[in-house]
Every structure is written in structure tokens, then in C-alpha cells.
Amino acid sequence: MVLQAEEGQLTTSSPRILVATAVPVERDAVARAFPEPAAELSRPGTVLHRLPDGGPDLLAAGVGPALAAASTAAALTAAALDGAPYALVVSAGIGGGFLPDAPVGSLVVADEITAADLGAETADGFLPVTDLGFGTVTHHPPAGLVAAAATATGARPGTVLTGSTVTGTAERAALLRARHPRALAEAMEGFGVAEAAAAHGVPVLELRAVSNPVGPRDRAAWRIGEALGALTDAFGKLAPVLRSWTPHDSHG
Ligand SMILES: O=C(O)c1cccc(C(=O)CC[C@H]2O[C@@H](n3cnc4c(=O)[nH]cnc43)[C@H](O)[C@@H]2O)c1
């Protein structure tokens, strides 16, 4: 809860939260966790679905880190210019899970959001962009919020990787796990959403419902309906956590 001075009175209100999914079916799965329908709201460069009664704004931000970053940044800027900035951004959706730790239908909450393919290949292997002297490859969601989200939803905390390419072979899956032993899931947007949030000084959370194992490509085997159902259930449990979360918990 946040205390706000309103016409001389102290009132309580929930922090404003933006939930960024990749595609509209993921956004709608999140929306189904809330009792009232969302209202569509156009902003420059983006379209939001606003839930009533202090619920989050929902954004289908697009597939991949670049479009997700651009859409999230547009929403963050619009909110700031409206004088009602977001206090938290949540990257959410389906994802690939590393077996055996994150099976299909399970949930993963990121305690690290890591760009898996941002860097350079060399004769001696992959160098992350930080080793080249640039930027960052990992964002850390607030630890207290990660713990609360894990407790409320049953999500397992761990690293969630972001890549521009869905892993399609056992070799690539093993290589990623060797480079990132704490990785539980892989998706395509979290790092982009986190970069946009960081540019605005806003904390980020990432929650993934596992639709498929990370490994050999078998698109027909993706359990998208099951994962979307898990996402809805998770947001039903996460909503009270988000409502009572205060930005002062950022590092707690
Ligand atoms: O076809 C559908 O009905 C459908 C419904 C919801 C989502 C999709 C997508 O294709 C979304 C792609 C989205 O999913 C994430 N994802 C899922 N599995 C993986 C994976 O193994 N590796 C990387 N990303 C994965 C990703 O974030 C994509 O944006 C289709």
C-alpha cells in the first residue's frame, strides 16, 4: 500500500503496476484472474488494458526482447507523462522450462533475468556483453517480492533466461544450462522488459508458466492451454501480493 496526500487527506492506494506479456492470449490469461473486465486505453506507441479497482494495466508487448522493450518503454513514458508512473513492471507469460527442475505446467519466478545471447562468440567461447565493456546482462527483481511471489503462487525461484531464438536442440539446452546453472526457464521478453523498466528506475518481476521443455523442437507438444491456465491461477494468487507490495521493498 502507498499513502497518498489527496486534498489534504491521507488515503491509501495500491502501487500502479504494469504487466507486460508477449501476445494477447497471455494478456487475456492474466486478465481472467481479475473479476472485472479491463478497459482498452490507447497511448502513443502502445495499447493498454486497464483493470478497475487498482488492478494492474496489461500490455501485449510483442514477441522478442526488442519489441517488448520498445512497447514497455512507451507505456512507462506515457504513464510518467500522465503524472501516474508505474511502481513495478511484471514480465509474464508462457516459457520453456529446463528439465527436471521446471516441468510443463509449473511456474518459475525470476530472481535473475539474464540475457542469454547478448555478447560475442569467440574462438574461446561466448563472451557476455559486460566482458566487452558494455551495459548489463542481468537484472535482479526485488528479493522480497520474489520470495512473496514464490510463496503465494508456488513458483520456483531461479534464473530466467531471455533469448531472441527459442532453443531447439538438446545441445543448445545443455550449453545454456552449463553457462547458467541456476537457469530454470527460457523466454523471449524478460530482459527487454527489464531494460525498459531500469531506464525508468522501476523494479521488475518476471513470472513464467512452463508450456514446453527447453530442448529439441516439438511445437506440437507445447501445452499452451495448460500453461495459460497456470498463469491465470498464478495471477489470482499474486494479485494480493502485488496490491500490498510497497516500492520501499525494492531491495528487501
Ligand atoms: O499459438 C498459440 O496459441 C500461442 C499462445 C500463447 C503464446 C504463444 C507463443 O508462441 C508465445 C511465444 C512466447 O512464448 C515464450 N516461450 C514459450 N516457450 C519458449 C521456449 O521454449 N523458449 C523461449 N521462449 C518461449 C516466449 O516468451 C515467446 O514470446 C502461442
Image (spheres, rainbow, N blue to C red):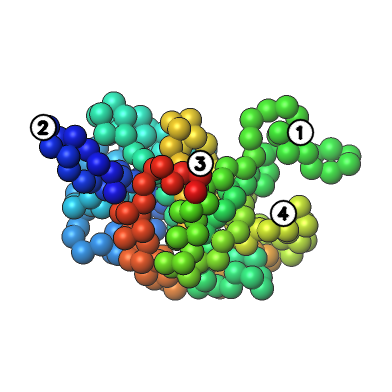
Tell which circle, 4 or 2, labels the residue nearer the N-terminal end. 2
Residue 228 image-quadrant placement: bottom left
Q: Tell me the element at label 4.
A: loop
Q: Is residue 64 above or below residue 216?
A: above
Q: Tell me the element at label 1.
A: helix
Q: Residues within 10 Å of mark 2 (few under 14, many from 20)?
A: few
Q: Tell me the element at label 2.
A: loop
Q: Which residue is mark 1?
A: 131
Find the distance from the CA under tag 2 to the CA under tag 3: 35 Å
Find the distance from the CA under tag 1 to the CA under tag 4: 16 Å
Find the distance from the CA under tag 3 to the CA under tag 1: 20 Å
Tell which circle, 4 or 3, labels the residue nearer the N-terminal end. 4
Q: Residues within 10 Å of mark 4 (few under 14, many from 20)?
A: some
Residue 166 image point, x, y percent: 61, 55
Residue 123 image-quadrant placement: top right
Tell which circle, 2 or 1, labels the residue nearer the N-terminal end. 2
The structure residue drawn at horizontal position 46% and vertical position 67%, both measured from the top left corner, is: 151
Where residue 194 is drawn, which disc sits there?
Answer: 3
Find the distance from the CA under tag 2 to the CA under tag 1: 51 Å
The structure residue drawn at horizontal position 78% and vertical position 39%, both measured from the top left corner, is: 127
Q: Which residue is mark 2?
A: 7
Residue type at the position of mark 3: Ala
Q: Tell me the element at label 3.
A: helix
User: For this rendering, which residue is in front, 211 or 249?
Assistant: 249
Whether residue 192 is visible here, answered yes or no, is yes
